[in-house]
Amino acid sequence: MMPSKPLVLSLGDPAGVGPELIVASWFARDVHSLAPFCALGGARLLAAAAKKRGLDVPVVQVSSLEEVAAVFPRALPVFGAIDGDYAPAQPCKAGAQLALDSLTQATALAISGDASALVTGPIAKSLLAEVGFAFPGQTEFVADACGVEAQDAVMMLAGPSLRTVPLTVHVALSAVPSLVTQDLITRRARIVARALQRDYGLAHPRLAIAALNPHAGEDGRFGDEDQRIVAPAIATLRAEGIDATGPHPADGLFAPRGRATFDAALCMYHDQALVPIKALDFDQGVNVTLGLPIIRTSPDHGTAFGIAGQAKAEVGATVAAIRMAAQCARRREKAA
């Protein structure tokens, strides 16, 4: 499942675990049969991160992405001249600027088609705001760069055991009931269904829609939103031929028998979606952005400044993000 063009990886915040996980992923490339990829910038920084982690990782600057496939078996290719000092666990404004420059240039390569997919390293949003980053996160940044409305860029968390989609993300729990509408559910469910068909090879994806309230409201005793909003949205989706079921009480949806009945669960709020995926697949969880003209994945963890540079960060989620990006890119190529 190798795409014809290389993947491009943005560095993430250089004071976090992103750089060391890029070099660790290249070091494990044969074990995990990873498709060729290159880092966007940071040649000196990545070499220092490899040394700090105790890995023998040659780093080679390439002048074009066409060189990546030939270089990748023997060295980690780096495209782009941007660079910085490696100072793990010491976040700063200069590092945030490097992270933003890497993200910007890597995204452009994916949009132009020079790279088959984009894998983004973890960032520190508060630091990025200091250098002019005006988005809630990388998902919204990439969507804007692609010319896609933020509401049509759908976050999916995917691991070996589970796929979940939070319909509302970084908002207060008290605001969730007013944000959950029939249009939100149906609009995002359509995007998820199309993406599961196109990028994951599921001809007839099964969507489970989680209830907002405990016990799906229990006939209105715990709230009427599930009867008034969620159930009609599901009926609309089913009328369109989408295999959507629910509203399912969330307390039983993620048990083994429940997980066997769906391909992705659409959840009403952040923790309803992220708690089960992190409980089941913490070290292999991938954040995927659906609804874009490009493939974008990211390891489902943060910068982890507290353990950066200590060789403690697990590489599994970064490897999984690279593998998933390559698989999705290959499926798109075959379907084109």
Image: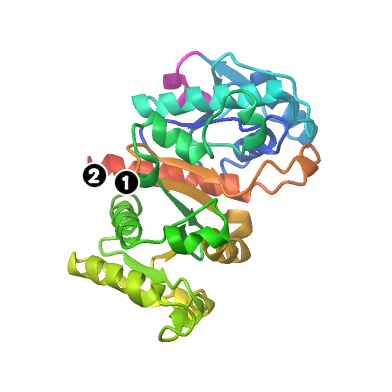
Tag count in the figure?
2
Of the 4 image quadrants, the one containing the N terminus is top left
Which of the pair 167/27 is nearer the observer? Answer: 167
The reply to whether discs 1 and 2 touch (Cβ–Cβ < 8 Å) is yes
Cα gap from disc 1 to disc 2, whole angstroms: 6 Å
Give how far across and how far down residue 117 sits, in percent. 42, 35
Residue 274: tell me if it is visible: yes
The spot of residue 235 in percent (x, y) is 25, 72
Residue at the spot of label 2? 335
Residue 193 image point, x, y percent:
30, 58
Q: Secondary structure at mark 2?
A: helix
What is the three-letter code of the residue carrying label 2? Answer: Ala
Other-residue count near label 1 (Cα within 10 Å), few / some / many at <14 / 14–19 / ≥20 = some
Question: Residue 225 at x, y = what percent?
Answer: 40, 72
| Residue displayed at 73% across by 30% down | 49
> Which span is picked out in magenta?
63-72
Instruction: Residue at 57% x, 40% y: name it.
Output: 29
Amino acid type, residue under disc 1 in the picture: Arg
Determine the image quadrant of residue 147.
top left
Residue 34 image label = none
Question: Is 266 rendered above or below residue 11?
Answer: below
At 47% across and 56% down in the image, what residue appears?
A: 168
Q: Nearer the viewer, residue 54 or 170?
A: 170
Q: Secondary structure at mark 1?
A: helix
Q: Is residue 1 magenta?
A: no
Residue marked by disc 1: 331
**Residue 163 showing in the rendered view:** no
Dot 2, how many residues are within 10 Å of its Cα: few (below 14), some (14-19), or many (20+)? few
